[in-house]
Image (cartoon, rainbow, N blue to C red):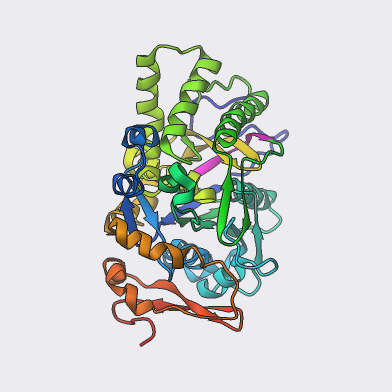
Amino acid sequence: MTAHAPHDTLAPVPAGEGVPVPRFGIEALNVHCGVARIPVPALFAGRGLDLARLDNVMMNNKSVALPCEDPVTHAVNAARPLLDRMTPAGREAIELLVTSTESGIDYSKSVASYVHEYLGLSRNCRVLEVKQACYGATAALQLAAAHIASGLSPGAKALVIGTDVSLVDEGAQYTEPAMGTGAAALVVGDDPRVLALDPGAFGTYSYETFDSARPGPTFDVADADRSLFAYLDCLSGSFGAYAERVEGADFATTFDHLAMHTPFAGLVRAAHRKMLRECAGVRSPEAVEEDFARRVAPALAYPREVGNLCSGSLYLALAGLLETARPRPGTRVGLFSYGSGCASEFYSGVVDARAQQEVAALGIGRSLAARSELTFDEYTELLGETRSCLVPERERRIDVDRYVPLLDSFTKERELLLHTGIDGFHRTYTWHSADRPAGR
């Protein structure tokens, strides 16, 4: 495949004589990162962690799920604002819903089933869930894009949602401050108003390793060193595969910006430095830092305020890049997705002229700023109940009214879906707003 010039508008390589490759990609993007947060310095202090390591983590805040929030509520609350902005015909055109999560609620029934119900999607919609740790949403995006590009269902759209909750506590040590909670939702179609994917421009790299896992509904296990090395190895491997497909691809010059899966921002900084040294021979600390500040740091704006969203992490980074850096139309973005276990992909896309308007309309930055701040004691009090949200029980009741003060800054302007309990193993939910309080 011939590479696109870095500043060209998207001009796909023809599939054959007079047959252009169709244009497709992300039409709309939103993230929902819960309604509460704890400052990371407060969490470090409360856990007695070494404050000298704060600079390495590069985190400001961590989103915290309430007991009335779970993977379903995160997914629905991320996607509903996108659907509210669509015409009835546009919503009806969504014929594929894919959720990706490592926070599954059932060995058989998918999170997507509940999401489909509470978003009111068509009963003719294909509904499924995928799992590959933090890579899952990218796999779903590529599957959805391939379906759109095939042209087998003209005008069709897909909804892809990466959604997760954190189960870590003090046993995770320095991983605890880095793990966030929330969801990223993408509408995929043939009018990519946010990011047009470069057709055929991708590289994948995967192998089996036990760097982290979630063997049960109440805890994660992780080998931090193995995970860090696997992430760096997969970035090198997936970009190498990308460069084999895309003639002339250069890590240092082909992409105006880079957005990467962000377990914590400090790892992205280290990965960027490694790639500049390997691929471009750039070793000057000043040159590395200038390139990082210009091309990478804008995509860390939101991950530094939220923590690791797992499969939603890359798309939280993309949202932050688009809303804070405001890249010009035609800007090419290189994207790296990694999931433990492990699977990875490097791909690219071009920012559309309408991207700024599309992303700004969702007010993501305002929502992050509106989260209620928790003290360390409030955080630890919530943690036990929150960490049990995936445990299957026959009956459970959640006192939603207890959390209303933390919800107020959100529900004055919009409804939020809340988790209210379990009835005969069936999870229950309700809509809450200032005008329609849950349970009243």
Magenta part of the chain: 194-205
The location of residue 329, given as percent across then percent down, is: 41, 37
- Magenta stretch prevailing secondary structure: strand
Question: What x and y, as percent, mark residue 137?
Answer: 58, 50
Question: Which residue of the protein is positioned furthest toward the front in this rendering?
Answer: 48
Q: On the image, which quarter does residue 294 sit in?
A: top left
Was residue 131 drawn as part of the magenta stretch in this picture?
no
Q: Is residue 350 above or below residue 185?
A: above
| Quarter of the image where one finds residue 245 | top right
Q: Residue at x 60, y 62 (%)?
A: 104
| Residue lying at 37% horizontally and 60% vertically, measured from the top left | 380
- 393 vs 75: above or below: below
Specify whether 401 is left or right of 110. left
Quadrant where the N terminus is found in the figure:
top right
Q: Is residue 257 visible?
A: no
- In depth, the one of 39 and 190 nearer the eye is 39
Foreground residue among 226 and 185: 226
Q: Whole-percent x and y of residue 231?
A: 57, 34
Viewer-proximal residue, 236 or 7?
236
Q: Is residue 232 left or right of residue 380?
A: right
